[in-house]
């Protein structure tokens, strides 16, 4: 943490995992120099079918458009770092289904699905992975749930895991809504669904919760940031996409479990505490502190996921 509370980014890629601050600073300096030089010289689709019963109808709020005037979206080249292949599931997991479906704008999408084998009212977890991630990364965080028999849906999004397309905030949020509609097609009403995610996926999960109208059963948000501009530091004004989690946290009324590691040097846990503190007083909430970094000690993250699920289930029994 630098002067004035600004976050000082370590000199490696965000999330393996995505933003290089020095690269953004260099881009900013280049653009500002170009603007100054110019000043001197001139001296002057078709949506996925979804269930439409009153109990499970999705209220979809279209994403706010990104500000394309900010470097014409060039900043996205430094933000999104998709893995080109789906990878392999966490060792020892039971067989799963690979589902192919179409996004709200015709985007080809895919998901891995474990129906689970637990009796009773175990909800479905829809989990969104982080930047530079894929299906394999999703299982690193959800393997504990899957092994315990909980139903889990792991959606992939445009540009990631071998899918075509270019990631943008609007595009990823659209893909997240398509995943939630897929969950309904599989028989899971919103009130039977927990929306979860890690890092960039945590931001996507929080936005998906709100884009759907906060009708899901709850959310689990892991190791995410207050906003993309906050992560970019001095290059904040170059960001075309925002993922403004802080403003959404202030309006979140759905039960939410927040998870953040004490050793996270990529997205400091101060982000998590600030987001948690922004939740309304009456919102059911829990903060789970874990002894882990940003994307390591996956067994610790898996245990935290199970504990967060147990917390959500306990709420319904009160």
Image (cartoon, helix red, strand yellow):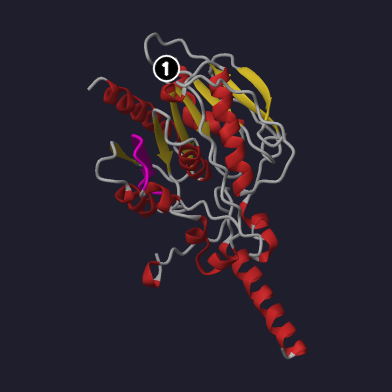
Drawn side of residue 122 relative to residue 16, left or right: left
Q: Position of residue 188 (x, y in %)?
A: 49, 19
From this viewpoint, which residue is outermost toward the front?
A: 54
Q: Position of residue 61 (x, y in %)?
A: 53, 41
Q: Position of residue 45 (x, y in %)?
A: 72, 35
From this viewpoint, which residue is outermost toward the left?
A: 318
Per the image, the residue denoted by label 1 is 148
Q: Is residue 121 above or below residue 68?
A: above
Q: Is residue 111 above or below residue 249?
A: above
Is 262 magenta? The answer is yes
Is 299 magenta? The answer is no
> In front here: 94 or 287?
287
Q: Is residue 16 above or below residue 51?
A: below
Residue 112 seen: yes
- Disc 1, SS: loop
Q: Position of residue 131 (x, y in %)?
A: 58, 45
Q: Quadrant of the C terminus?
A: top left
Tell me which residue sits at (42%, 31%) in the image: 215
Figure quadrant of residue 13 = bottom right
Figure quadrant of residue 137 = top right
Determine crowd level at label 1: few under 14, some 14-19, many 20+ residues with C-alpha closer than 10 A.
few
From this viewpoint, which residue is outermost toward the right?
A: 41
Q: Is residue 283 above or below residue 240?
A: above
Count the labels in the image: 1
Q: Quadrant of the N terminus?
A: bottom left
Residue 133 seen: no
Tell me which residue sits at (57%, 19%) in the image: 185
Q: Which residues are magenta?
A: 251-264
Drawn side of residue 307 relative to residue 34, left or right: left
């Amino acid at each position: 943490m630098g002067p004035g509370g600004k976050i000082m980014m370590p000199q490696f890629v965000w999330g393996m995992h995505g933003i290089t601050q020095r690269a953004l600073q260099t881009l900013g300096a280049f653009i500002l120099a170009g603007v100054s030089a110019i000043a001197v010289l001139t001296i002057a689709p078709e949506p996925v079918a979804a269930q439409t019963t009153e109990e499970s109808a999705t209220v979809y709020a279209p994403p706010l458009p990104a500000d394309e005037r900010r470097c014409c979206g060039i900043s996205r080249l430094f933000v999104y770092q998709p893995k080109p292949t789906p990878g392999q599931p966490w060792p020892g997991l039971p067989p799963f289904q690979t589902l192919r479906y179409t996004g709200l704008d015709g985007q080809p999408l895919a998901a891995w699905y474990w129906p689970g084998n637990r009796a009773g009212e175990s909800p479905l977890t829809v989990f969104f992975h982080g930047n530079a991630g894929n299906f394999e990364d999703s299982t690193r965080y959800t393997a504990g749930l899957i092994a315990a028999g909980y139903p889990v849906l792991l959606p992939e999004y445009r540009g990631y895991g071998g899918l075509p397309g270019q990631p943008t905030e609007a595009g990823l949020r659209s893909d997240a809504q398509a995943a939630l509609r897929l969950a309904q097609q599989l028989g899971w009403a919103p009130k039977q669904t927990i929306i979860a995610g890690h890092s960039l996926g945590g931001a996507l999960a929080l936005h998906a919760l709100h884009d759907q109208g906060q009708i899901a059963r709850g959310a689990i948000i892991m190791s995410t940031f207050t906003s993309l501009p906050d992560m970019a530091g001095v290059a904040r004004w170059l960001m075309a996409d925002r993922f403004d989690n802080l403003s959404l946290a202030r309006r979140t009324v759905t039960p939410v479990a927040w998870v953040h590691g004490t050793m996270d040097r990529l997205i400091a846990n101060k982000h998590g505490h600030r987001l948690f503190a922004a939740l309304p007083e009456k919102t059911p909430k829990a903060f789970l502190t874990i002894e882990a970094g940003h994307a390591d000690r996956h067994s610790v993250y898996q245990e935290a996921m199970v504990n967060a699920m147990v917390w959500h289930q306990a709420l319904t029994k009160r």
